[in-house]
Image (tube, rainbow, N blue to C red):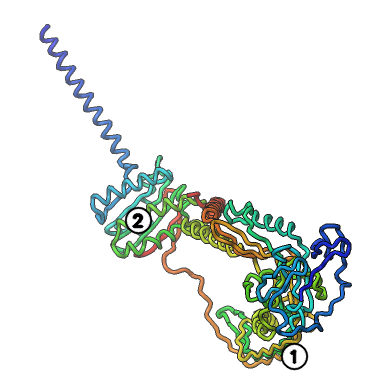
Amino acid sequence: MILHYKCPSCGSDMSFDADSGELSCQSCGRHENIANYPEELKTYTFSEDEAKEYHCENCGAVLMTAAETAATRCSFCGAGVVIADRLSGDLAPAMVIPFTISKEEAVAAFKKWCRKGVLTPRGFMTADRIKSITGLYVPFWLFDLNSRVQVNAVCTKVRTYSDSEYIYTETKFYDAYRDINLDYIKVPVDASEKMNDALMDKLEPFPYDQLKDFKTPYLAGFLAERYNYSDKELLSRAKDKISSYIDSYTRSTLSGYQTINYKSKDIQTTNVKSDYVLLPVWMVSYDYNRSEYIFAMNGQTGKVVGKPPVSKGKVAMWFSSIAAGSFLALKCVAFMMGGGFW
Amino acid sequence: MVRSRMFAQSFLSLFTALMIFLLLGITAAAADADAFDRDRYIYDFAELLTDQELSELQSLASGLGKERNTAFIIITLADSQGKDIVQYVEDFYDEQAPGFDQPHGNTAILAINMQERDVYLAGFKKAEEYLDSGRMDQIRNKITPALSDGQYFEAFSSFIQTSYDYMGYDPGVNPENLLFKWWFQLAVSLGLAGSIVGLMAYRLGGRVTVNARTYMDSNRSKVLSKQDRFIRQTVTRQRKPSNDSKGGGGGGGITGGGHSHSGSRGKF
């Protein structure tokens, strides 16, 4: 089933407006509040074979979509359409963070970010070769995890003191035990096969206070994907993400000891809750020097991630000027301390 | 008439000869009165150096000495001549009155005695201030291995070179401070530049800005129970390093002529 939003006033296509957070009509300027929109996709089920091919509600053309596409624009008439069967039942997202950065703001923010690149080539800094910028709702699982940590460790406290003849080193050994409960809430893990995990991790944090109950109109005019990996498949990645946090917390409970030698470390992490959400990401594709660079921008905070090209000349310039500057500074310090300049 | 002319002639020649003799006598006397050559810096009485080494050291001492306004003097003795080496150096300064541009001037002396295998370094005037006993100890420690090996030329040129270097540092600072070494300064600046540029390149792709506290529910995350049981303790002891310095030392003093000096004495 294809969802398509027509303006009740003038009949034009409506799409989600990042500035107002409402469904808006570009022709007559009518705004519709999304929060009150009726939504019954969660209970809606489609038979497996119902649709292999979708037609645009607006112009009737065949929609060419990838298997995971949940929202797109009709390539013929440009109307924003939502493929409801890919967002229903198990595939129904619980929540969504809508875009607050519009396309124009995203382009401006990206250009600003490019200008700040201290090591990027001059030609890149002008940011005038943006090939495409796409607003994409990326599927994420938000995990609420509970970890029970039980550690046994032999720890030492070292003290030194001295009398007139000897320096004494006193080492006290302790058998330390800690039973720790750790709760991590809304740990995000991206569930899309296409998205680079490292890139998505750097986009965090997403402002969770902007989470809204999922309504399809939020997707109108943007691209959206359904998840490729279930929460069960991604649980191990979520555990990986918090394992360093657990380690540092455990370590902090043993502060006061100079050395810590773990004898046993038992970590039981269980998945308390996992919510399927769609998070807003602007994908920027950029042409520079005959190769394509992909950047991602957090659609809420405007944080940009992705590896820009590096100018060898600028690296050499920075390296040599820092080296020369600090060499000169050291020379001055030496001179002021009473050493000769050369 | 002819006779009287001849007499006058012979008188004139006699007078000239007398004058020449007198002149010679005066210069000879003057030379005698000031027999010490202030531009000679190497006194190799023990004959440890070849002629070529001698002239090389001489030109090194005069070249570097000019820049520091100091006479760098090296004395080698085959035997003590009944004098302690410190006494010898003090007497040498009193009697010969060396100095860069004036008698009893700025002088740094390295003296070795082959019989006693004594080495003594002394600094007078400017060299007393810039090459104090501490610095002289450092120089002596630096050249003693070469002296022990019999590499006198290397040791002597190292003495001149190092004394020259140390006089470039204000009195009171340690010239061997790592901060003063050009290679250390270079290494630090290259390392700094490398790490800063490396960090810049690393952060180019965006940083992870979440930390351990971002997703933690601090209300429910806590230590449920803990136990710290003392098992045992060990005590090791180590003797305090003693402060008295090893052999040598001696330091400076005042010559019989009333010239104070710095110094460092040792064996090789």
The answer to whether residue B78 is above or below residue A37 is above
Q: Is residue A173 visible?
A: no
Which of the 4 image quarters holds residue A254?
A: bottom right
What residue is rendered at 63% in x and 58% in y? Answer: A131
Q: Nearer the viewer, mark 2 or mark 1?
A: 1
Disc 1: host chain = B
Q: Identify the amino acid type marked 2.
A: Ala
Label 2: few (<14), some (14–19) or many (≥20) C-alpha neighbours in 10 Å: many
Label 1: few (<14), some (14–19) or many (≥20) C-alpha neighbours in 10 Å: few
* Percent x, y of residue A60: 74, 68
Which of the 4 image quarters holds residue A175?
A: bottom right
Q: Is residue A43 visible?
A: yes
What residue is rendered at 65% in x and 60% in y? Answer: A132
Disc 2: host chain = B
What residue is rendered at 67% in x and 63% in y? Answer: A304
The answer to whether residue A5 is above or below residue B109 is below
Label 2: element kind: strand
Of the 4 image quadrants, the one containing the N terminus of chain A is bottom right
Name the residue nearer the viewer: B198 or A289: A289
- The residue wearing badge 1 is B225
Q: Disc 2 or 1, which lies upstream in sequence?
A: 2
* Percent x, y of residue B261: 45, 52
Label 1: element kind: strand
- The residue wearing badge 2 is B111
Circles 2, 1 touching at the beta carbon (< 8 Å):
no
Q: Identify the amino acid type marked 1.
A: Ser
Whether residue B209 sits left or right of residue B45 in the image: it is right
Q: Which residue is the extreme one toward the top?
A: B1
Q: CA distance from mark 2 to mark 1?
A: 75 Å
* Percent x, y of residue B53: 27, 51
